[in-house]
Image: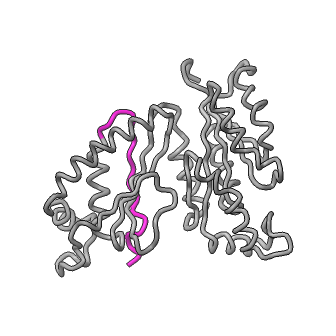
Amino acid sequence: MEENRKPELLIVTGMSGAGRSTVGNALEDQGWYVIDNLPPQMLGPISDLFSLSKSKLPRIAVVTDVRGGEFFAELLSRVQELRQRDISVRVLFLEASNAALVKRFESVRRPHPLQGDGTVLEGIERERQELLSLRESADIVFDTSETNVHQLTNRVAEAFSTTSDELRLNVMSFGFKYGLPPDADIVLDARFIPNPHWEAALRSSTGEDDSVSEFVLSQPGVSQFLDNYVAALQEVLRGYVRENKRFATIAIGCTGGKHRSVALSREIARRLGGEQNLSVKIRHRDLGRE
């Protein structure tokens, strides 16, 4: 561990069935010391390991969830207490749609922890309501609705394998008709740009093709908009680094996620690619769905 690096404590929580076990395993593969199903009241003593251990555990991940019953209700206040100490504390919240969670519980034939005498869906909705404040205060949100085990493992590696102060930025294109990405930190609407879909020569192409990219970027006002937007983003991203935020997602949407959002994502990622302490990756969520 680097001498000047703060100890790191990651709280992994979220919806039952959203992939906590997969995330825990992936974190272990990245060198984290993972503790599963820990009551929030034990977070203080666990964090004391940083000062008591001679070898100093640089990174501890604690997986906690509604299985802790009444103890789990104190998680948010315990996290706020820890943030007053000289420890880097982050909360990773795992999210998924009701449909995806119902399908997962039905596939393993297990009841939801909060369903009681009701249905799986009733248990999911109750849990979602109980976790609302925790989700809103989370540092990172992963939506695993359409993510398999291997994709989630890769995403954990991208977000948490670093041991430096580098910010890992995910620039994501998407289509509004398929819904907003629930794990986006910043959302940009590209529908103010004329749609290449209505150009016969461009309709079958995508924003990854030069012809579409040139059409989108050459529209009136787009170049000036990008200059201003990227300049504003640079200030935001520098603030993220100061606040020890290591992973962020910028979601750029158009109608179908095929033309405008893809072209703008590529251009914004290109412009940000040379920033210090910043690693940029592009993901096109809905490309190919049409």
Does 131 sit above or below residue 178? above
Between residue 120 and residue 100, name the one nearer to us: 120
Name the residue located 74 percent from the left edge and 75 percent from the top edge.
106
Residue 277 painted magenta: yes
Check the image and report above or below for 127 versus 177: above
Magenta stretch contains residue 186: no
For the point 21% across and 71% down, the residue is: 194
Residue at the (62%, 24%) spot, across then down? 86
Estimate the x, y position of residue 236 in percent, counting from the top left.
38, 41
Check the image and name the residue furthest to the right: 117
Splitting the image into 4 quarters, where does residue 114 fall? bottom right
- Colour mapping used in the image: one colour
* Position of the C terminus by quadrant: bottom left
Name the quarter where the N terminus is drawn: top right
Residue 41 at what x, y percent from top left? Answer: 80, 38
Q: Quadrant of residue 118?
A: bottom right
Q: Residue at x 45, y 31 (%)?
A: 242
The foreground one among 218 and 136 is 136
Residue 40 in the figure: left or right of residue 143 = right
**Could you tell me residue 158's position as x and y percent?**
50, 47
**Residue 204 relative to residue 51: left or right:** left
Please name whichever residue, 288 or 71, is drawn nearer the observer in this view of the structure.
Answer: 71
Q: How many marks?
A: 0
Q: Does 215 sit left or right of 12 as displayed?
A: left
Q: Is residue 90 left or right of residue 162?
A: right
Please state the extent of the stretch shown in magenta in the rendering: 274-290
Query: Residue 251 at what x, y percent from top left?
Result: 40, 57
Q: Nearer the viewer, residue 113 or 35?
A: 113
278 up-or-down from 105: above or below: above
